[in-house]
Image: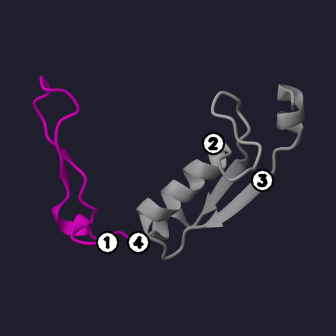
Amino acid sequence: MASREDALAARRWFIVDADSRVVGRVATQIANVLRGKHKPTFTPHVDTGDFVVVVNAAKVRLTGAKLTDKVLPPPHRLARAVCDARQPDV
């Protein structure tokens, strides 16, 4: 059984190029690496994840009509403003 110190020593660095990749899929892959689910020694209560550096994050691809139509509800029911998540014209 590996100890916490062994898990910390075994951490690796991953560099992810997000250029022209779908934002949801790359986010899921990054989350799996951060949590350590890609390792055969994955245990939910032990932090065995690796480090991730994302380059070209501004160039991710949004699918569907998210660029023009995405409007998020307020984060709390008492909030007055609606968060506008539409991408600005570039």
Check the picture and name the quadrant holding the C terminus.
Answer: bottom left
User: Crowding near pointer 3: few (<14 within 10 Å), some, many (20+)?
Assistant: few
Most prominent secondary structure in the magenta stretch?
A: loop
Q: Which residue is mark 2?
A: 35
From this view, report whether residue 55 is shown above or below residue 49.
Answer: below
Q: Which residue is mark 1?
A: 63
Q: CA distance from mark 4 to mark 1?
A: 6 Å
Q: Which residue is mark 3?
A: 13
Q: CA distance from mark 1 to mark 3?
A: 28 Å
Mark 4–mark 2 CB contact (< 8 Å): no
> Camera-side residue: 69 or 37?
37
Check the picture and name the quadrant holding the N terminus.
Answer: top right
Amino acid at circle 2: Arg
- Residue at the (63%, 42%) spot, across then down: 35
Residue at the extreme top = 78
Q: Which residues are the magenta region?
A: 61-90
Mark 4–mark 3 CB contact (< 8 Å): no
Helix, strand or loop for disc 3: strand
Where on the picture, by quarter, is residue 54?
bottom right
Q: Which residue is mark 4?
A: 61
User: Crowding near pointer 2: few (<14 within 10 Å), some, many (20+)?
Assistant: some
Q: Earlier in the sequence, mark 2 or mark 1?
A: 2
Q: Earlier in the sequence, mark 1 or mark 3?
A: 3
Helix, strand or loop for disc 4: loop
Which circle marks residue 12 in the picture? none
Q: CA distance from mark 3 to mark 2?
A: 13 Å
Instruction: State the image coordinates of residue 62 (x, y, percent, origin top left).
Output: 35, 69
